[in-house]
Amino acid sequence: MKRVGIVGLGFMGMVHYLSYQKLQGVQVVAVCDTRPELLTGDWTSVRGNFGPPGQQMDLSGIATYASAEELIADPQVDLVDITLPPFLHAEVALAALAAGKHVFTEKPMAMTVADCDRMVAAANRADRHLLVGHVLPFFPEYAWALQEIGSEKHGRLLGGSFKRVISDPDWLANYWSAESVGGPMLDLHVHDAHFIRLVLGMPTRVASCGSVRDGLPEDWHSVFEFAGSKCFAHATCGCIRQAGRPFLHGFEIRLERATLMFEFAVQKLEDGRDEAGYLCPPTILDKSGQARRVTLGDGDPMHAFEAELGHAVRVVSGDASPGALACELARDAIEICRLESQNLLTNS
């Protein structure tokens, strides 16, 4: 039985807490937050863009702490799960690794490549796992793409186009702060940067163009080239200033004998309702000459987080390799984002 301590009880902390309740071989034994009401189990103020609303939680039998240092010092905790704002990931992860704990931290791994390198080095010194919560490969559409690519039945991977766009998240504090969140590059595009790194490798050349806000990339296109192959990738990402479409993501992935594609969006209707659904359902174009729809389940994002954290538990239990959660991949995703930002800001 692996024992988890969650540091940070915001929306993602709640998602992780609820996900662990569905898993075998793991138990949440400690939680940490600076807000006293959350330590009493009153999570009714917690809000997010998917999953159940915040509610009253029964934290009996769970140790509660007001500081990460106290939780890290708890000998009952095997794995420290960090769901704090991004700028705090590195500091808490380094402290937990130094204390001999395994670490799972939400994406982005850190705000800078230098901090990522420090974290990787600390995990190696401590001989502990450092896993980074890039959940995208556990979403059904992306898991399907990984399966189709890995099967090699469609031939060699030729490249792909990836899209991830949101409405301006003016409800999020410090979103456009380079020190705290990093804007859409580190909050949003890092998902696709990680997936591109996972399936295509590290790009050798990046070209980006687009708009800038407050010194950060706002809305942009990037093209990636890769050494030793004819593969290429293209990504569109950023924020639009119209609130009528809060979220959109999708891909078109090309293999020698097939194309995989899907696109999903949330739109605000005139009657005030949010309409969420596929603009293009998961579809494969193959040698049949037809567009074949693929059914992948109900698409509840909570299932993806359960799968991701279940994999993390198996890794720290010695029953699986890190795979998509490997810290080295997460580090490279930050480097890809850095290269795009540098290129875009230089050319804007």
Image (spheres, rainbow, N blue to C red):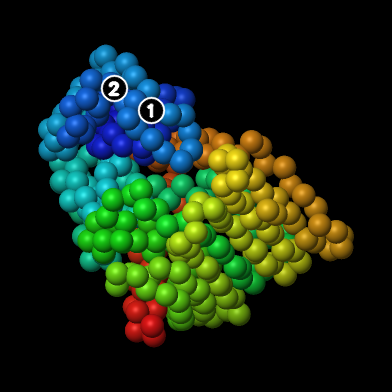
Residue 42: numbered disc: 2
Image coordinates for residue 164, horizontal then vertical, percent? 52, 60
Q: What is the C-alpha distance between the residues marked 2 and 1?
A: 8 Å
Image coordinates for residue 167, horizontal then vertical, percent? 47, 56
In primary-sequence order, the first of circles 2 and 1 is 2
Q: Nearer the viewer, residue 270 or 246?
A: 270
Q: Is residue 28 left or right of residue 49?
A: left
Q: What element carries label 2?
A: loop
Q: Which amino acid type corresponds to the residue marked 2 in the rendered image? A: Asp
Q: Do the residues labelled 2 and 1 touch (CB within 8 Å)?
A: no
Res 282 seen here: no
What residue lies at 34% left-to-right and 32% top-to-bottom? 46
* Outermost residue toward the front in this view: 271
Image coordinates for residue 279, horizontal then vertical, percent? 68, 53
Q: Nearer the viewer, residue 256 or 44?
A: 44
Q: Which of 248 and 254 is in front in this view?
A: 248
Q: Which of 246 and 130 is in front in this view?
A: 246
| Residue position for label 1 | 54
What residue lies at 52% left-to-right and 39% top-to-bottom? 301
Does 331 appear above or below 40?
below
Mark 2 burial class by Cα count in 10 Å: few <14, some 14-19, many 20+: some
Q: In what quadrant of the picture does the C terminus appear?
A: bottom left
Image coordinates for residue 258, horizontal then vertical, percent? 74, 63
Q: In this view, does 222 lie to the left or right of 119?
A: right
Q: In what quadrant of the picture does the N terminus appear?
A: top left
The number of callouts visible is 2
Q: What element carries label 1?
A: loop
Q: Which amino acid type corresponds to the residue marked 1 in the rendered image? A: Gly
Res 305 seen here: yes
